[in-house]
Image (cartoon, helix red, strand yellow):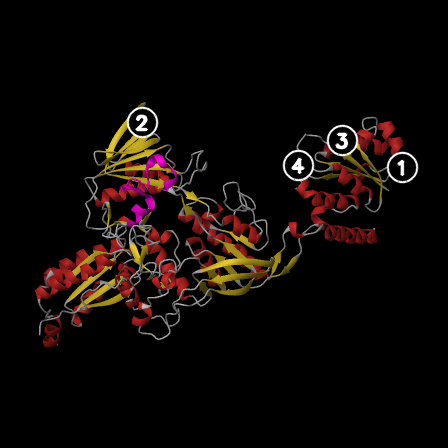
Amino acid sequence: MTGIIFTKVDNGYSGALDYNELFFYAKGIPGVGPVWYSTDVPLYDKQAMADLIKEQQLKRIVVAGDTPGMVKPFLTGAMVIAGNNPEDVVLASFREYGATDNTKIDRAKGILFCIALGVTFAEAALPEETDVQPDTLVIGGGIAGIQASLEIANGNQKVYLVERTGTLGGHMAMFDKTFPTLDCAACILTPKMVEVGQHPNIEILTYSEVKGVTGEPGNYKVKILNKARRVDLATCIGCGICTEKCPAKAPSEFDNGTTLRKAIYIPFPQAVPNKYLIDADSCTYVLKGKCGVCVKVCPVEGCIDLDAKDQEMEITVGNIIVATGFKPFDAGKIERFGYGKYPQVITSLELERLINAAGPTEGNIHFRSQDKKGNWIFSVESGMPKSFAIIHCVGSRDENYNKYCSRVCCMYSLKLAHLIKEKLEDADVFEYYIDMRAFGKGYEEFYERIENEGIHIVRGRTAKIEERNGRLMVRSEDILNDQLIEQEVDMVVLSIGLEPREDAAELAEMLGISTEEEGWFTEANYNTDPVNTFVGGITIAGVCQGPKDIPDAVAQGSAAAARVLQSIVKGKIKKSIKDMPLEKIEEKAKQFSNSMEGKS
Amino acid sequence: MSYEPTIVAFLCNWCSYTGADLAGTSRMKYASNVRIIRVMCSGRVDPTFVLSAFKEGADGVLICGCHPGDCHYHEGNYKCLRRYHLLQKYFQQMGLDKDRLRLEWISASEGRQFAELVDSYTETVKNLGPCKMKQVIETLT
């Protein structure tokens, strides 16, 4: 007969395992005789304990608890005195197998059950393998999603790439240059986008969103909402007449509101797919019910359908890669910097578009000005600023907003300073930083290079930005010289940080994966398993797991693809441990236990 | 009828060809005199390519590559630059105007710059007049 002794540790933690429940559960396990708390038995008196063992005719003793190893030596001694095998004192350590709090009481029960039957928990609770569907879903068409899709598609497997906006590319497409190599971002990204667009194994679903996920690892049913594009992808010839004639305008998402676009538009000239789409929020026909100019001028009959409705489709996939990326911090939240109040306070992403040769000002930095209709946009007609202040850590490393470091801002701020100097040689550039985080290969060298280009790098936080004499006055501290400083500049650039998407939590719930306090998706293990989640068949890649730069996002995209290909090549995928119900574990433990008895 | 020169342009796949593509998709207008040949890298442009272009009747040759430091193959554009200087010397010896060959750096986001470059270069070649290379070779052989 087997006896169970619980070593109860009362650490006053409210979420701790409910030992009373486990106690009663233990009594019901087959083959189990007496169940005690360690305080109920003469644990430290070997002779008395041995007598008790004899009296109860115990052959095995299971010591269960958070740290059961502590009392084992006393019991092995007692077992020897009682004439039994000392190796028959076994431990059921809840913490070791991850049953750390009361939400995981089923796992604790499973551990107890297995050990009592003489089966190791890892053996019985080994997740089952199931067949895997060969298709893969990639959520997010940014650089991480593109990379992952290409890796899988080049392995001859089908990929569905779902993208919320009208084009692939994500945030990287908006950047002018990448740090520290100063490569042109479009030169790296656009050939990859074209490759995705032409790949026979990739089905691109732009302007679409994932609406629901059911099923289990290896066999997910995914509901996808195809938002009405109102332009037929197959017949649109991309002539551009509709955009020319369209009367409605709205701020361009791709150019970060630095310029206006029409209601029927291509997000940017190198978009993939390079077809038009209608923005329902600004289209006159959708809003007021009459216009239809685009339909009249379109040379292809039936190409534009203004009354098109959203459609839903369902696909079956074996694996899902989540690469949803980030949302830039809303600089308007920090009132003291005056974003939205002073037109010459701009965000780094806006400057990125201004500097880009394909941007609204053809690569020249101009002041923000009002057009005839009162929209604040950047145009080549206004003057050029001569001095700049770049403020680091806007919305990052700040208890009031985000505590974490966004990781890329230091480097991209240095890059922007360099690009400003490249465009306007005589400009004065001031950088205000807290700590300079140049953490990667070649980054420190890049920092040194920028320092020597005549950029004023000031260490200290910025307190406030005010308007004075028509210019902007930056009040800041200079820690290294131990003084408060004021500097008048023409333009202030806020280096905004990275934030999780607003609906990241919603998606996480849909997929059953978890998010961290800040909202980033949780990986299985920070050091050794940064792409898997706790749910089988769902991997994460890119910034949605935590702030990272382009090389890291690309590397993670490839890593996620490797995990997916691994399961597809094998044809089998492991279910998650948490999918396993207690009954299943009990059943398997019994099976193992019976087969062991048969052998001996 | 005014004289329209024929210009052969060698564009690198990664930066300049994408830049020219951007000029096209952005609907920028530029001179139609240019005949684009896509090469994987400006470093692929062998000097004999340039010479055979003239032999076949081109009036000017334009080579575009990634900006220095941006090359997809690390140093292809530097190799191109060396050959360009070499060709310039050779052109002088052959009595060809050095303006008949031009090397420019165009990145993928510089559609506008590409369109402007084509326009200005077409103008330059127009002023130089037709290249007699083809005729000379034909009369000699």
Give the chain letter at badge 4. A
Residue at which label 4 appears: A15
In the image, taking residue B40 as reference, residue A405 lies left or right, namely right
Residue A27, image quadrant: top right
Mark 3 element type: helix
In the image, taking residue A34 as reference, residue A479 lies left or right, namely left
Question: Horizontal and vertical percent for residue A516?
Answer: 53, 42
Q: Which of marks 3 and 2 is nearer the N terminus?
A: 3
The image shows residue B108, relative to residue A105, as above or below, that is below
Residue at which label 2 appears: A478
Q: Which amino acid does label 2 sit on?
A: Asp
Q: Which of marks 2 and 1 is nearer the N terminus?
A: 1
Residue B117, image quadrant: bottom left
Residue A299, image quadrant: bottom left
Q: What residue type is labelled 3?
A: Val
Question: Horizontal and vertical percent for residue A73?
Answer: 77, 31
